[in-house]
Image (cartoon, grey):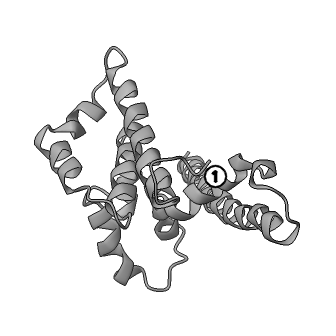
Amino acid sequence: MEKNKGLERDLENLKLKKESMKLLLDVGIAVPLRFLEQAKNTYLNEQRGGLNQITIREGNQAADSANGTTDAALFTLGILKNEDALAPAFGQVYANVIPAEYLQLPELLRRAWYCFATLSLSRGLDVARSLNFFAKNNLVSLMTSSGNGIVEKLQITLESLSEILVFGIYWTGSSESSG
């Protein structure tokens, strides 16, 4: 009986490790695919409209958006050589928790932190007011509550706002989407 529990625990740990590796693999694929897609414009003279905009967008998001779940995977897989130096930065960016604790947060709350971390680390954007609004209105408790779909609508709005501000302004230098 004791042996079975140990095997079940090992199996669960392997499943978590596999999920973490997949997250890192997805990012590792999206960024070079973006690069190759953009290279078609330079080297093959393919017009911007002919490029796969979804591939470029996914690569932009993978490279330049916060993703605490993926960032936590770097720690939980034990592949960082400078974990002690990076752990405080992780805590500052993501809810003042360690990576293992972060992974225990509800998904909607983690997604909210992705948005705020992306905004807070984006050059050229003054997001202090937005972050203060978030803190003052205790939106963390709202994000973790359940109800009549308000939380989900708030999350979709927050993600859209982050994408517009970061990729619309940051990438193109204007309010137009980079596509």
Which residue of the protein is positioned furthest toward the right in this rendering? 44
> Could you tell me residue 179's position as x and y percent?
62, 47
Which residue of the protein is positioned furthest toward the left in this rendering? 136
> Could you tell me residue 103's position as x and y percent?
41, 52
Q: Residues within 10 Å of mark 1 (few under 14, many from 20)?
A: some
> Could you tell me residue 15's position as x and y percent?
62, 51
Residue at 36%, 44% in the rendered image: 112
Q: In the drawing, does residue 62 fall left or right of residue 28?
A: left
Q: Quadrant of residue 119?
A: bottom left
Q: In the drawing, does residue 43 fall left or right of residue 122?
A: right
Does 13 appear above or below 75? above
User: Which residue is nearer to you in this view: 57 or 156?
Assistant: 57
Q: Secondary structure at mark 1?
A: helix
> Could you tell me residue 28's position as x and y percent?
67, 66
User: Which residue is nearer to you in this view: 158 or 21?
Assistant: 158
Q: Quadrant of residue 61?
A: bottom right
User: Which residue is nearer to you in this view: 151 or 42?
Assistant: 42
Q: In the drawing, does residue 132 fall left or right of residue 64?
A: left
Kind of residue at badge 1? Glu
Residue to which mark 1 is pinned: 58
Which residue of the protein is positioned furthest toward the top in this rendering? 148
